[in-house]
Structure formats: structure tokens, C-alpha cells
Amino acid sequence: MLCQNCGKNEANVKYTQIINGVRKELNLCSECARKLGVDRIDIPMDFTSFLGDFFNDYAESSLLPSFSIDNAKCKTCGMTYSDFINTGMFGCSDCYDTFSGPIDSLLKNLHGTAKHIGRGAKNVDELLNKKPSKNASKNNENSKDEKSTKLEELQKELDKAIKEERYEDAAKIRDKIKEMNK
Amino acid sequence: MNWYLQNGKESDVVISTRVRLSRNIKGIPFITRASKEELKEVYDKMKEITPSLGYNLKFLKLDDMDSITKQSLVEKHLISPDFAKTKMPYTAIIINDEENICIMVNEEDHIKLQVFTSGLDIDNLLNLAIEIDEKMQNLVQYSYHEKYGFLTACPTNVGTGLKISTLVHIPALQMTGNLNKMLNIINNLGMNVRGLYGEGSKAEGDVYQVSNNQTLGITEKEIAKNLNLLAQKIIDQERLARKYLSKNSLKLEDEVYRSYGILVNARRLSEEESIDLLSKVKLGTDLGIIKELNDKKIRELMLFTKPANIQKRLSTKLSVIDQEASRCEVIKQITNED
């Protein structure tokens, strides 16, 4: 059979596509299959887990007795340790703190160090750093008190900024307070 | 004129340079864990701030583009192949007319700020990226960690979030058998190198992408310095190899003109073949052997012989087979221009 795309070469790749129950079959030559990008689909390889395996290895060797990484789960996004192993990707900013034990070894292995020395972020709401306000609503019970202390701290920071005539910063802090009070 | 058609510094060896900063918005999970609403939040925020960034940037929704347009952006290296195919909702790019600034929204991270130039110009490019980054920081609060720096979904980008990459065209190193030596050295210096097209050690078209691996525990300036040094070394070695090849000038002239002959006279060319031919023709043009072409035409040929860009240029949808004849048409157009 000739390739159904080019009609030129002998077909040697059979491509079956099922989308929403609709079955489509195509006979392609290897050149067309590669061009259409269908040959890649058949390979059951997942390279994303590579990084996770790396992480796994280092986590084990640096495991503290009191810290069981297997049960560690990010409170903010629900990312578990095995999720990270499978994807090599973190779920949210807080994952970096949740898995901070073994993450140092991983980062040292990837970058030779685990300490950032480059440019800093502009940080008008540094006080919010530990628990972002957006996620606070998700676990409301324990964050209520934190929220009010944060508001107090922000208010202090705002007063200070005004006193020091840093109006741009003050405006940003004011916006943050507004957002938290929503 | 678009950056990728312009002549750049050291452009006999360096095709282009890209600086990329990965950023995430504080309080919103990374895209793998973000809900539809949260992705929309990123999308809306970025849309909202686009006019304030300046540079005539426009916010374009990815879903509004057809697949050929998206593929043409991949061929210009403006977006990643995965991003062109993504099924994720609320994806967008923020781009200017020159296309030297292209910010991907909701790709691997919330924000992938990218700036480009033809040739090698890392310092100016990094300054531009930082300038835009500073503006953006006034408008969105980034996710930042005291110890780990800018936080990213993938730990390979954390810290500075900075990846600098240059595309180098090194056919003479390949022809003189020095390619693997060079690739090894690059790897030993802790840099990443891969063929731009194709797989394995010999890349189609002799084009390689060199980029930094380390993003944490190193300053932006150091990354730039290292990449600059390495690029300069590659340029020196490639030029040396070219000089060596030029000693047997008849053989080299024959080789590059044969490629030129096929390129401008063929009636059907596959993408692979045109990449191979163009590599030789570019070498011949850079060495002043082929007088019929110039740097700008080479750049046009390299872009407009790619599948999606052929279709864009001719404004028709073409099958892979029809593209082969159209590719030759386009080559004729470009080589016959004044």
C-alpha cells in the first residue's frame, strides 16, 4: 500500500487515532509519519520522570529520621512527593518549602549550589511571602489568625513607607491590604 | 524589519541569541496545579498589564491562531514546539511588531519573558530583558524565595530563572572532524549543547544551540559572561577550521557551489535537503565564495523554506508533498530579488 499522505512511498507506519470515540486510520510512509509528528506518539517513554528519579535518589540519602518525605504533601496545592517524582515539576511556590529537606541536595546536584545570589525580587509584600493570600482562602481555618497578624504587619509597613515618603511602595501595600480585606 | 532577518554581530557563525527569564506570579499555583480559574487569573493579569509595559507589545490569545501560524512562530524560535501544541486554556503570547520580544503566558511557567537578537549580543539583550522584567515587577508580584530566588515549576530554572542560548552554525568544525571535540568541551564547561534540527551527534544543517545549565548560585552577569566567552571560543575555532578548509579552495568552492546549484535549480526539495544545502550555501556566502547571495537572503532562505513559513508566505495551505515544489518557488523568488 502506498502512503496516504504523499502517495509516493510504500506505507510502513500504521497510525490509529481515536478522538471522542471516532476512529481514524492512516497508512503512512516513515518520512511522512515523521513530518506529521505521528511517529513520536507511539514511543512509550516519559522523559519527565528522569528528574524525579534524580530527586528520589537524593531524597533517600539525605532523609532525616523525623521527616518522612513519602507522606509529605504540599498544603497549598496538594502536590505529593510521588507527584513530583512523576512529573519533575513542582505544583506551586510553597512546594519549595514543603520539600525543602531533600530539595537542597537536588539543587546542589543540578546547579552546584542551593543558594540564590542573583538579582532579587521587588518585594513590597515580603510579609506575605510565607503564605500567599490567594491560597489562604483554601485552608481558611488555620489562616484566619495569620491573616489578621499579616494585616497588622502590613499596616505598620504602610505607615512606615508613608513616613519615609516611599509613596510608590505605600500604594502597593495599600492595594495588598485592600485585596486581603476583600 | 524583523530581528531574524537582520544582520547581527558575528553572524558568520552565530545565527541568533535568546535571553529568557522564567517567572511565576505569587499566590497562584504553577500551571500544572493551577485550576482553570487560576490560569485565567494569570491570563487576565498579563492582558491587563500589557499596555503598561510599552514597547508596542500586543497581547495575542493562542487559541485565536491557526496551527500554521503557531507553527510559523515555532520556526522563528519565538515559542516552544510544546506550547504550539498545548491544549491548556488561557495561553497567550505578548509580542511586538519586530518580534524581538515575545512573552509566553501560561507555558511551563506563568511568564516566560524572551528577547531575541540576530548574531551575538548577549549584554545588550540581557539589559533589555532585565529592563522589561523590572517594569513587570512593578505590576505583578513575582513568586520569590529568600534562599532559592525566583521560583519556577521546574527546578532546573530556579534562582535567576535565566537561560541564555545562542544558535551557532559550525559546518567547518564538522567537515574537519573537530565537532565532537568541541561538543565535549562545551559539555565539560557545564553548558548545554544540542543539535537544533535532527537528533544524534550530527545535527542537520550544522546548527547547534548552546545554553547555560546553571541558573542558581550564579549571578545573571556571570551567566552572560560565561556564555559570551564560550561563544567567542566557538566562533574562533569555527573560523580557524574555515581558514583551514579554504586552503584547499577548489574542493571547498566545488562543494558549496554544487549545493548552491541544487538549491536554486531543483524543482522539488524536502525540508531536510534544503536545510543541508543551505548550510553549505551559508558557509560559501560567509566565506565570500558565493557572490550571488548575501546575509539577508540567507536569513530569508533559512526561514521561508520551513513548512509553515512557506505556507504563510504563499498564503495557501499545502500538503507536505506540495510544499516541496513550493519551496523551490520561494527559493527562486528570494534569490531573484534585487
Image (cartoon, coloured by chain):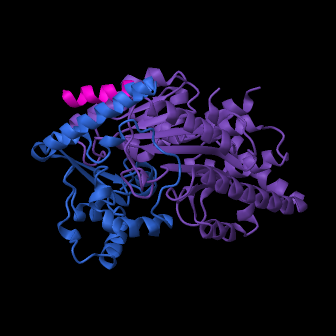
Q: Is residue A27 visible?
A: yes
Q: Residue at x 69, y 48 (%)?
A: B14
Residue B142 screen position, x and y as percent:
39, 40
Look at the image and give the colour of chain A: blue
Q: Residue at x 62, y 67 (%)?
A: B189
Look at the image and give the colour of chain B: purple
Q: Is residue B238 above or below residue B336?
A: below
Nearest the eye: A119 or B334: A119
Residue B25 screen position, x and y as percent:
35, 39
Of helix, strand and loop, which mostly describes the magenta segment?
Answer: helix
Is B169 positioned to the left or the right of A174 in the image?
Answer: right
Which stretch is magenta? A171-182
Nearest the eye: B145 or B264: B145
Q: Residue at x 54, y 66 (%)?
A: B200
Is B328 positioned to the left or the right of A131 in the image?
Answer: right
Q: Is residue A169 above or below residue B274?
A: above
Residue A46 screen position, x and y as percent:
33, 63
Is B27 positioned to the left or the right of B65 in the image?
Answer: left
Residue B10 screen position, x and y as percent:
76, 46
Instruction: Using the rendered view, name the quadrant where residue B194 is placed.
Output: bottom right
Q: Which image quarter holds the N terminus of chain B?
A: top right
Residue sticking out furthest to the front? A163
